[in-house]
Image: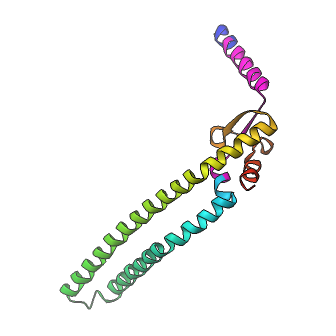
């Protein structure tokens, strides 16, 4: 047991000395940097514009579904069975269409977001490399890899500034 503790302690000392010798360890939030860069903001606005028509279509379908439900709730007692079945079928058809369009929109948005990230990634990588060389950082980790980070070790804003130049 004592040997195990000794090995763990030595390992930590060696790793910490390695990190110290290599320079400062900092983090960067890749997603935040890409999204908050000028190019990322512009591309995100374009993406919203492209998806607006599909979103409006979904909202219209949702409104139609709500109207059908309200009609059923209000008038079902005085409707014939045939009319009730017809409205239920119409509601089921619209619900199926709504779910299909929603999945299609989600897939389209995800693909567009991935394309946006891939198009801006080279700028991000150049900016990170530039900040690393300027500030002589030893290690730059993705923000997600760190459990806790104090703000002075987060270089996201510096990277965004480089990306915007």
So how many labels did they put on this image? 0
Residue in the image at 26% along x and 91% along y = 78
- Residue 67, image quadrant: bottom left
Q: Is residue 20 shown left or right of residue 60?
A: right
Decide whether residue 38 is among the magenta residues: no
Q: Is residue 147 above or below residue 82?
A: above
Q: Nearer the viewer, residue 111 or 7?
A: 111
Residue in the image at 74% along x and 21% along y = 18
**Is the stretch drawn in magenta largely helix, strand or loop?**
helix
* Rendered location of residue 153, percent (x, y): 77, 40
Residue in the image at 65% along x and 44% along y = 125
Q: Is residue 155 shown left or right of residue 107?
A: right
* Rendered location of residue 156, percent (x, y): 72, 48
- Quarter of the image where the N terminus is located: top right
* Rendered location of residue 69, percent (x, y): 36, 81
Highlighted magenta segment, given as a residue range:
7-33
Q: Is residue 43 above or below residue 117?
A: below
Q: Nearer the viewer, residue 75 or 13?
A: 13
Q: Is residue 147 above or below residue 99?
A: above
Q: Is residue 113 shown left or right of residue 38?
A: left
* Rendered location of residue 129, percent (x, y): 71, 40
């Amino acid at each position: 047991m004592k040997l195990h503790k000794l090995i763990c302690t030595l390992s930590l000392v060696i790793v910490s000395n390695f990190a110290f010798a290599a320079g400062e360890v900092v983090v960067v939030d890749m997603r935040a940097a890409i999204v908050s860069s000028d190019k990322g903001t512009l591309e995100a606005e374009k993406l919203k514009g492209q998806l607006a028509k599909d979103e409006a279509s979904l909202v219209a379908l949702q409104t139609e579904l709500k109207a059908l439900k309200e009609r059923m709730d209000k008038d079902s007692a005085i409707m014939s069975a045939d009319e009730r079945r017809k409205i239920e079928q119409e509601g089921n058809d619209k619900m199926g269409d709504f779910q299909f369009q929603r999945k299609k929109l989600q897939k389209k948005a995800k693909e567009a977001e991935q394309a946006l990230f891939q198009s801006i990634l080279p700028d991000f990588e150049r900016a990170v490399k530039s900040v690393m060389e300027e500030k002589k950082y030893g290690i730059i980790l993705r923000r997600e890899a760190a459990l806790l980070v104090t703000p002075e070790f987060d270089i996201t804003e510096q990277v965004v500034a480089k990306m915007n130049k």
